[in-house]
Image (spheres, coloured by chain):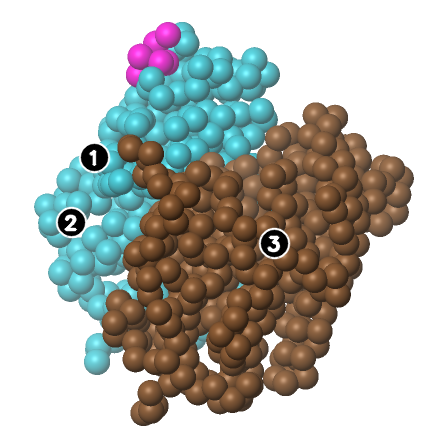
Chain colours: A cyan, B brown
């Protein structure tokens, strides 16, 4: 039903759909292949846009990309809402990061100091200031900090909006599964298949299980707190994402497992941490328990760009915990690459070629020692380029 | 499609179906009205047959009926299995009652002493003996006791088996809801409608909410414990019912509410208590969270017998937490009453007439003081009859 498209996108999650939208809007004929759009990691994701709270030790390049993408989110959300008329639940109250016990606070402060040290906007708050912002926090909470630029969106609203935008721009949804890239006939193929990218490309994308809960305030009222809350509670890391319709997402485990079963222990730990931080949640309904699989990579950073030895094939996968926040920058950079044939310098640290297993070209410097089955966890092949206009913050 | 039946039973839960089975087997033409058989309290029930563990202070008559019915269970289960060929999950490993902390154990021992004092078979166990019986119990568990005669059945297997037995005996299922007893045309009407009995009869049956969880051992193996375990864990009462297919039922809250929402706080308390008592449960899948409504009564005892002022109408409702264990004795006594027209003396303490609101005949001795809307909680109009052959134990 579609003549040979210019671009085939494999995967109709947020990343694949946003790429399709951007390319279709530039006049490319685009087909998006997915038997179940939005049924992957995004269906489970909480939708935090958190370049600050997600800035971890040793992940400079990733932090830069998160920050660049978060900076694009206001315009991206506005444009998407204008085009589709869909409320995607984009909210800008910011994020409170809190520690329940003295030990929790000590651990949190170490990370906040790191984040401040690389120039990210983290504002420590005294307990009284914390409670002024969120009176519903447990009196036990020892302290916190405010990340004014860490926002949220609702992934279950985002995916239908992106699909609508892509289709309005002329992209075609093809509801079939792609088992092999040889099944796809297009000028350029973009693999945005999340965990499915491993089987299609040989890239080292692995499933990282996440379990989370959806609570709902009784009687349809809004939750008694406005900020995204990320906390350490007796050593447990938990986030609480409030939505105006009463929903609160509580997440998430990070597990090196590939099943999507919900475990009693995980639910217990999430609920205990959530109720310890915000006691009113004990009175909420528990409406959903679920597990999903994030597409993880050896260095926790996404894989973006041309696949070595596979002309005409681009990867846009491996977004791990950051698929939602990274959607705008991924879509822009991949669309630019397809349009111009030239990779933006920002893409360099995220090139597929940093992994020896990608495609047929194995960099000479990355030959694997005998017996090694996984590439090293943190090495990258290039340095991330800087674009000052796309970043709010700088760091060393 | 059915000529005027001899008996109409309203409600196809275990009690209604067992009554229908017993009466149809005696040659009565029986119709059972229910748009959704087995969808009431039995769908949520754990299926403990626990006359000992459920023997509470001040409930002598109820304890007697529980014991009498539990004594009928072996023959009842065997007959039902023979007639239908259905495995109803009847298991006789007995029940361990345990206390996690010293405070829990002190509270539990007070009840065990009461139960022993009225002649019930409770065997205190030293911690070493407890662990010999169930090595999976947490090392923290301070002590326990064994109730050798408290068993279990699987209510979700029981209901289809009873339906099969009733239909094989000639009873007819009528899949329509009964809104008023005047809609029913039969020689005798038995109201076995659980919480629905209140609207049909005016009896003081109220919904008592219970929330519970279903866990499942991973990989299809059987749970790592054999006994039903009833515990006190940091003040929380919880039971754990293992089934051979890997299921473990964890219950249950007792709440004076009529909704069936699942609450985050209830799930947290149940999971915490369960994992504190039996740590391996943290590794189990959480496969179901649900809430149901038990038909409670002012004195916690069922309502069995003729409705005052309503000739030809019998009640068999108000079984509260004990519907499964009380099914055999209820079915036998009600079937006898229908057959012979004479109430067994065992029914006397459970007569509908003990509540002034029942029917139109108000006992002179039970006139309500002005302003009282509920009858007194524990008074009963008669003394329970004894049938030594139906009881394993006696008490004062």
Question: Is residue B50 visible in this depiction of the protein?
Answer: no
Residue A378: assigned label:
none
> The numbered mark 3 sits on a residue in which chain?
B
Report how far apart the C-alphas of labels 3 and 2 lie in the structure.
67 Å
Indicate whether A277 appears above or below A309.
above
Instruction: Let me know if marks 3 and 2 both belong to one chain.
Output: no
Contact (Cβ within 8 Å) of mark 2 with mark 1? no
Tell me if residue B144 is in the magenta stretch: no
Residue matched to label 1: A74
Query: Is B313 left, or right, of B250 in this rendering?
Result: left
Q: Residue furthest front?
A: B364
Query: Is B103 left, or right, of A41 in this rendering?
Result: right
| Label 3 element class | loop
Which quadrant would the N terminus of chain A be assigned to in this image?
Answer: bottom left
From the top left corner, tell me how far across and down residue B34 is, in percent. Answer: 37, 73
- Magenta span: predominant SS is helix
Report how far apart the C-alphas of labels 1 and 3 lie in the structure.
74 Å
Residue B384: assigned label:
3
Indicate whether B71 appears above or below A63.
below
Residue shown at the point (57%, 48%) measured from the top left: B251
From the top left corner, tell me how far across and down residue B228 is, in percent. Answer: 70, 53
Contact (Cβ within 8 Å) of mark 3 with mark 2? no
Residue matched to label 2: A86
Question: Is residue B67 visible in this depiction of the protein?
Answer: yes
């Amino acid at each position: 039903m579609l003549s040979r498209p210019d671009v085939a996108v494999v995967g109709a999650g947020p990343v694949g759909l946003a790429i399709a939208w951007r390319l279709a809007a530039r006049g490319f004929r685009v087909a998006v292949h997915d038997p179940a759009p939005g049924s992957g990691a995004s269906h489970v994701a909480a939708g935090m846009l958190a370049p600050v709270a997600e800035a971890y030790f040793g992940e400079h390049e990733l932090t830069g990309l998160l920050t660049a993408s978060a900076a694009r989110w206001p315009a991206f959300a506005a444009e998407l809402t204008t085009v589709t008329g869909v409320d995607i639940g984009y909210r800008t109250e910011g994020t409170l990061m809190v520690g329940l016990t003295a030990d929790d606070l000590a651990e949190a402060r170490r990370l906040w100091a790191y984040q401040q040290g690389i120039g990210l906007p983290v504002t420590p708050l005294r307990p009284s200031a914390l409670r002024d912002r969120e009176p519903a926090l447990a009196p036990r909470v020892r302290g916190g900090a405010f990340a004014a630029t860490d926002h949220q969106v609702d992934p279950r609203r985002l995916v239908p909006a992106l699909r609508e935008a892509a289709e309005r721009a002329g992209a075609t949804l093809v509801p079939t599964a792609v088992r092999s890239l040889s099944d796809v006939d297009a000028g350029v193929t973009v693999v945005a298949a999340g965990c499915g990218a491993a089987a299609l490309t040989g890239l080292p994308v692995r499933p990282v299980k996440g379990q989370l809960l959806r609570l709902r305030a009784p009687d349809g009222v809004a939750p008694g707190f406005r900020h995204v809350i990320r906390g350490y509670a007796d050593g447990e890391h938990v986030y609480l994402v409030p939505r105006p319709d009463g929903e609160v997402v509580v997440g998430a485990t990070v597990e090196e497992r590939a099943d999507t079963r919900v475990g009693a222990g995980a639910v217990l730990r999430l609920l205990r941490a959530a109720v310890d931080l915000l006691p009113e949640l004990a009175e909420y309904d528990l409406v959903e328990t679920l597990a999903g699989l994030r597409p993880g990579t050896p260095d926790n950073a996404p894989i973006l760009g041309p696949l070595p030895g596979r002309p005409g094939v681009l990867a846009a996968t491996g977004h791990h915990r950051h698929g939602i926040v990274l959607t705008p920058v991924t879509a822009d950079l991949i669309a630019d690459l397809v349009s111009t044939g030239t990779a933006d310098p920002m893409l360099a640290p995220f090139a597929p070629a940093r992994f020896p297993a990608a495609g047929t070209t194995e960099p000479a410097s990355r030959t694997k020692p005998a017996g090694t089955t996984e590439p090293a966890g943190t090495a990258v092949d290039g340095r991330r380029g800087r674009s000052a206009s796309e970043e709010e913050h700088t760091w060393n």
